[in-house]
Image (cartoon, helix red, strand yellow):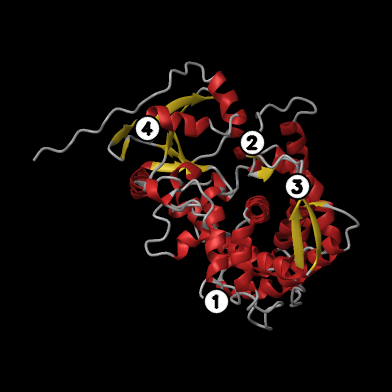
Amino acid sequence: MHAVAPRPLPRTPAVSGLLETLAFFRDPEFAADRFRRHGDLWETRLLGQRTVFLRGEQAVTDLFAQGDALEGWWPESVRRLLGSLSLANRQGADHRARRRVVGQLFTAAALRRYAPAIVGLVDALCRDLAASPGPVALAGRLRRFAFAVIAGPVLGLDAGERDALFLDFETWTQGLFSFPVALPGSPFAQALRARQRLLERIGAVLARAQEAAAAGRPQAAGGLDLLAGGLDEAGLPLADADVVEQLLLLLFAGYETTASSLVCLLLSLLQHPTELAWLQEELGGISWPPAPGEAATAFDPSRAPRLDAVVKEVMRLIPPVGGFFRYTRRPVTLAGVAIPADRVVQVSIAASHRLGSPEADLDAFRPRRHLEAGGCGALLLPYGGGERVCLGKALAELEIRLLSVGLLKQLDLELLPDQDLSLAIIPSPTPRDGLRVGLSRR
C-alpha cells in the first residue's frame, strides 16, 4: 500500500499582508471567515510573515507529536517586551531549565500556601463592591483582583507595592500586541518605558527576598523563596536579571488571561439566568469561606461539578487567548496537509473549540454538556498544550473557583441595560463597556 501524499496548503491571495494584518487586528471574525473559505488549515501573510492558521483535533495532535521540528514563537512586540531572557523566548534546554524553575511556584504545595490569602482577597473585593454607591464596571475591579493575586499571595508584594506596579503593568500589557515601532507616545514606546520601571521594581523585591533568605528570616508572604537554587541548563544558578524577566512573564501570564476568564464567566452567567440559577442550586449547599486548610481543594470538580462545568464551558466559548504560536524549523505534515519550513503556525483555540458534531450546538452556552456522557465532544485547549502549556494553569483554575464561589455566595449581580457587551479581543477578551452591573448583598 502506498502512503498518501500530503495535500497542498490552501493560501489566501494576500501579497504584502498589509490588508490581512489590519483585518487580523480589527475583525473578530478574521479567522472564522477564512476557515469557512479555505478549510481547517490555510496560509496568509501578516506583516510580511507567512502564517498558517489551523484548527481541529487531528492537526493539533500532529503538531504536538512533531515538537522537534518546531519552536516557540511570538510576534516581535511580545518578544521585545518580554525580553530576551524570558522563558517565552527560550528554546530547547534553555526553555526547559527556566520552566522547571518557575514551575516551583505552581506545585500543589505552593497552591495550598496561596489559597488562604486568595480567599482573603475575594472577601475584600466583595466588601469593596458591596460598599460601592452605585453600579460598577466589574471588568476593571476583576483586573485589579487578578493582579493582586499574582503579585500578593504568589510574589509577596504588599498592597502599596501592588498599587505602584499596577498602572505600569497595564501600560506594558496594552503594548504587547501593538505595532513594534517605538514612535514617541505610541503604545509600544510607552510599554518599553513601563517595562524598565517594572524590571527595577521586581528586581528590588527579589533582592529583598534573597536578603531575608540569606539571613534565615522566613518570608512573610509569597513564594519567591521557592525559586531559591534555580539552575540553568548547565546546572549553574540563574542570574538575578534572568529570574526577574521570568517573574515579569509570570505577572502577565497569571494576570491578564485570568482576569479575562473571570469577567467572561460572570458575563456568560448574567446573560444566561437559567444557567446561573442552575449553578446557584449547587452553591446553596457549599459553605463560604472554605474550612481552614481546605481552600485549595474545597471547590474542585469532585465537590462542585456544576461549577467545573460552567468554567469549562466559558473556557470553551471564550478562551482567554485566541491561539498560540509555533515556528516550523523544517517541513511538517498536519492533518494530511504539507506545511513548509519557516512558517509561523497559529493554533486557533476558539475555532477548534467549536468543531464537533452539528447536533451538539457548540455555538450555544450550555454548561451541562460537560456533565453528560461523552462530554462536549470538542477539543479543549484553553491553556494551550504540548511542552509549552500554561505554567499557571492550576493557579488560574483555583483562583477562578474561589472567586466564583465567594462572589456569587455573597452578592447578587444585575446586568445593566444599554451597554456594549461585545468583546474586545486583544490582549484578552473583555466586554467593551467594562461589564457594568448593579449589585447587592445576598
Give the residue displayed 63% in from the left and 34% down from the top. 77
Q: Depth-wise, is mark 4 or mark 2 nearer the camera?
A: 4
Q: How far is mark 3 from mark 2, CA to CA?
A: 14 Å
**Residue type (three-letter) at the residue carrying disc 4:** Gly
Residue 132 located left or right of residue 189: right
Residue 422: horizontal and vertical position, in percent?
Answer: 66, 39
Pointer 2: what residue?
Answer: 177
Mark 1 to mark 3 CA distance (whole Å): 36 Å
Amino acid type assigned to the residue bearing label 3 in the image: Phe
Which amino acid does the dot numbered 2 rest on? Phe
Mark 1 or mark 2: which comes first in sequence? 2
Residue at (57% x, 25% y) in the render: 23
168 or 198, nearer to the observer: 168
Nearest to the observer: residue 235 or residue 185? 185
> Which label's residue is closer to the chain start, 3 or 2?
3
On residue 39, the disc is 4
Residue named by callout 3: 169
